[in-house]
Image: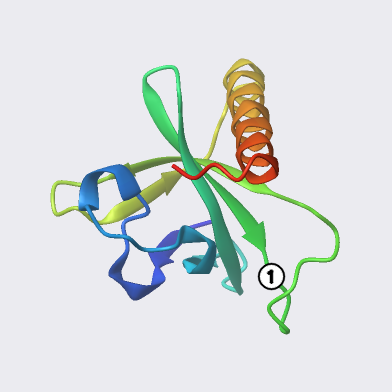
Amino acid sequence: MSEETLNGGCSGDCGSCGSDCDTSQATVTLTMDDNTELTCAVIAVFPAQDKEYIALLPLDENGENNDGEVFIYRFHTDENNNPELENIESDEEYEIVSDAFDEWLDEAQFEEENGSEE
């Protein structure tokens, strides 16, 4: 992956922008190492330890994901508030982030089942 763009001008950090946007509609276009572009839906931006991460759902040409694959990247914004994604390099960091994402999923499912909203 060499370049990322969050469509619609969204930084993905819903806690800091004050907008009532729905990140389930936000997408990211990734330019892969072979220069192909892949559109992904933003599932969540979530914390793990002292960093933020983003979970992305790759979409096919019809805007669907049939295999359930999720991409997780380290997420931050640069000094101009532009979003930047970084690969997770170590197995240890990946395990920590995977656990945090699983907890986020469990919370989201619990809130959905109980009619709670954040």
Nearest the camera: 84 or 27? 27
In the image, what residue occupies the spot 65% across and 22% down? 99
The picture places residue 6, in percent across and down from the top left corner, at: 39, 65
In the image, what residue occupies the spot 38% across and 26% down? 51
The picture places residue 77, in percent across and down from the top left corner, at: 27, 46
In the image, what residue occupies the spot 40% across and 33% down? 52
- Where 46 sits versus 56, above or below? above
Tell me how the rendering is colored. rainbow
- Where 93 sits versus 38, above or below? above
Determine if residue 32 is in view. no
Residue 78 appears left or right of 83: left
The picture places residue 32, in percent across and down from the top left corner, at: 58, 63
Q: Residue furthest left?
A: 80
The picture places residue 71, in percent across and down from the top left corner, at: 64, 48
In which quadrant is the C terminus drawn? Answer: top left
In which quadrant is the N terminus drawn? Answer: bottom right
Residue identifier under label 1: 59
Residue 47 appears left or right of 66: left
